[in-house]
Structures are given as C-alpha cells and as structure tokens.
Image (cartoon, grey):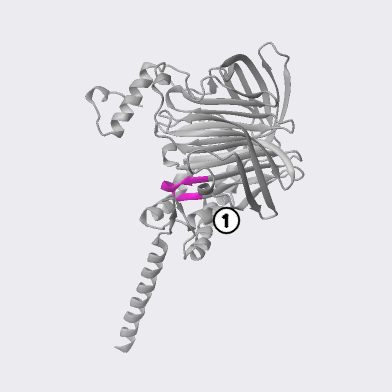
Amino acid sequence: MYFATSIIIGLAFGSAIFAAFVLILRRKSNYIFGIYPEKGIFYRLKYPLAKQFVRYWRRKIFTEHENELNSVEYLQSLEKPQTLSSDPKSYDVVSFFGANDKGYKFMITMERRRRGITRAAFYLWIPNRGLLSSPNLPDMEHFTTDGNTESEEFVANGFKIYPTECMRQWKITYNGAVKQGHKRFDFKFDGIFASQLKHFDYNRDLSSSVIADSVARESWDDQFFHMVWNVDSILKNRTHYEQSGKINGTFQLGDEPQVQLNLSSFRDHSVGTDRCLSSIYRYVYFALFLEDGTNLVVGILSQPSFFLSSLKVGYICLAEGGGYDPITSCNFELYSYGERGFPPKHENFIVETKERRHFVQIKAEESAIRYVGGDWESKVYNQFVSCTVNGVKGHGIAEYLYRNKTGRSEAVAETDPKWYKEIKSFERSLSQRELADEWSGVVW
C-alpha cells in the first residue's frame, strides 16, 4: 500500500513539474512596439533547447542526405528555372548584387510567378552621375504570356538571365530603356557572373545560434509546436541559397562609349510554394563589398507568423580563404532602425562570427523605392551605400522592406491585360468573402 501510494505521489509530482515546464515554455515575452519579443526570463532555458532542435532537423534533412544533395543531378535541377507548382503563391527568384572600389553599384532581380507573370527590377549607380533604373519602377509587374501558358525562363521586357554552367556561371543581360529622373535612355548591359565557391544554403548553413536566438524569444504555444513538427515539409517548400563571385561585363548608355564593368558580387536563388510577402512585417538586408575583397551579407527579418520575429542571417566571405563564415550574432535591431516607415541614412552595428567581430558603418548615397507583389503588398527602399568595416572601405546595397497598405496604383494598373485584372478582382473578392457568381469560373 505504501509502495503504491509512493508511486502515485511520484507520478503526480512529475506531472506537476512537466505542466509547470510547459507553462514556462508557453510564457510570452514583453514586446517592443507590439512586434519584437525581448529575451524573456526563460530565454536561457529555451535557447539551448532551440539550438538542439535546429541541429536535430539539420541532421535529419541535410546530413543524412548529403550525397544526394551534393550530386550533380540535384544541383543541376536546382539551378535551372523551376517548374512552378499549381499553388498560386509558388515562385522562382534570382537576384544579383555587386559593387566595386570605384563606387559602381549594380542590382538586378527577377521573380517568376504563375501565368507568365514576372516581377523585375534593374538598378545601376554610376559615380558622379547617379542612379539609373528600369523604366517601369516603382512597379515591377511584367506579363510575358497571354495568361494561359507558363513562362519557362527568366525573360521579360529586355531582361534575360540564365545559367550557363551549373553552380559556376550565369549570363545576365538587359537590353531596353533606363530612366534617371524624367529622362530616358537606351541601354545595354551584357555580363557574366562567375564563381568557384560552393553555394551557401540558408536552410543548411545558417548559424544555428542565430536561429535559436530568434526562436527562444517566442512563445512556444500549440501553433509553434505544430510548426516544429512539420518543419521538414515546410523547408522542402522553401529553398534559398547564395553564392559569392564576380560580375564582368559591359554597358552602353545611348550613344556614349561602351564601359567595362568589373564587380565583386553575389547572387541568390529562391524557390518555393509559399511566397506571401504580406506575412513579413519587415526586413533589412545589406550586401557589402570591401576593397580588400571581403564580402558581407547581413539580414534581419521579422516574420511573426513563422515564429521568427527577430531573425539575424548572413555570413562573411573572406578574400583570402574564400569560404563562408556564418554570423553568430548581430546587435542590429529592427526597432532601432527605420521603424517609422523609412530607412535611416546612417547605420552602425556589430556583427560577430566564430572567428571575429566586425564593426560596420554605412552611409546611404542614394535611395530608390519599388513595390513588390500583385497588389503592392510590400514597399522596398533600395539604398546605394558606401561603408567601412573594421577600417576597410567598401560599397554596397541595402534593402529595407515594409508592409504596404496603399494597394497598387490604379494609374499603373490601367495598362494591365484583361485576364490579369479579372484575376485580381477575383482574389480581392475572395479576401473580402464576397465571391461573385461571375468569377466562379476563374481558376489558376
């Protein structure tokens, strides 16, 4: 009898301890501006648990399939333009950023969506001249088909980007118009991105420390654990990788002489089935290229719906070694920079890796605005910057993304194809739960 009673008491005590532990994990931190969670009193308990979670899932998803994920067949399938799924939010995006010690700054991005919709932007900042951009900006929408067929290439209105050697070379061309203020010019750019480095896969190579830091700040409620148990399927639908390299090419503006352009650079490729910018509250992204050949990529993301309200990402790519050194911490906080809806002109922050601490100083030289999404769900400020990192000078590009609620300009949308206008009306009626009978036959 005594033995049975002891067991019952022990089980009850153990259950009470477990219940208290679960309540601790579910406890919410204080929030800055109602968005950014502070490190709560149980952060030090949750951080090592989160770090072990990350390592476990990486072993399961990546380490155990390392040979397959490094095979030529897999990499070739990853590099080419992807076949978009039936999900209307499926996407395939390539972007290139670059700069050199003369102060030239370059950016081109293309995003393929369903029905031949492509979102594209081009910027070239020229010292002593200023910023050139593709003429449709701040709108990025291009329509490459009649809406009944899918696009199979990164091609739209003068843009053309394609791989020529798997994980080694991409061809980049733009042949069309550019604008500077109210002036327009004929413009041609022809370049090659080349690299001998491996790619940096954000799911696989991002420091587990920065992921654990962000996750440990969140409330571990039922929705959180549901996401954790399904993280493998979530990651399979979201791939983002980058590669550091060089862009060598030429450009010609109107009848002016052709200019040779050699840039330190990196590219990114993002593929998935759920690119919903409206779920991202904010992000800031820096691509910096130093005179000694070092490249830095630093990002800060706030996506509360994905339990990443304050995620730091990025790496340092050293000139002498050529490898990627993931950042392990960064004291840049979104609430301190640009929370009022527009970015600051100066930023100073510290980035740490396992090997070294980097003191980053940034000064914006010019800024441009573009809107992303079919309804302009997001507003992006691209800054063209000079920088100093640990005393070494450089140049680069920064991005500040904000939620945007103004909707796409009616003046811009007037020239959209009829089929696209019908789709957007259909989507709005769904979001408002006012599905009209006349749209019942419209499908993706």
- Badge 1, how many Cα within 10 Å: few under 14, some, many 20+? some
Provide residue 131's location: percent of width, then percent of height: 62, 25
Residue located 71% across and 38% down the image: 394
Q: Nearer the viewer, residue 205 or 28?
A: 28
Provide residue 93's location: percent of width, then percent of height: 53, 32
Could you tell whether 233 is left or right of 64 in the image?
left
Residue located 38% across and 70% down the image: 20
Q: Nearer the viewer, residue 180 or 186?
A: 180
Residue 307 within the magenta-colored segment of the rendering:
yes
Q: Nearer the viewer, residue 304 or 350?
A: 350
Residue 12 within the magenta-colored segment of the rendering:
no
> Can residue 89 be seen from the camera position used here?
yes
Quadrant of the drawing holding the N terminus: bottom left
Quadrant of the drawing holding the C terminus: top left
Q: Give the residue number, with chain letter if any, for mark 1.
A: 209
Provide residue 296's location: percent of width, then percent of height: 66, 43
The image quarter in which residue 201 lies: top right
- List the single residue furthest toward the left: 437
State the extent of the magenta-drawn residues as a range.
Answer: 301-310
Give the overall secondary structure of the magenta segment: strand
The image quarter in which residue 386 lies: top right
- List the single residue furthest toward the bottom: 2
The image quarter in which residue 90 lies: top left
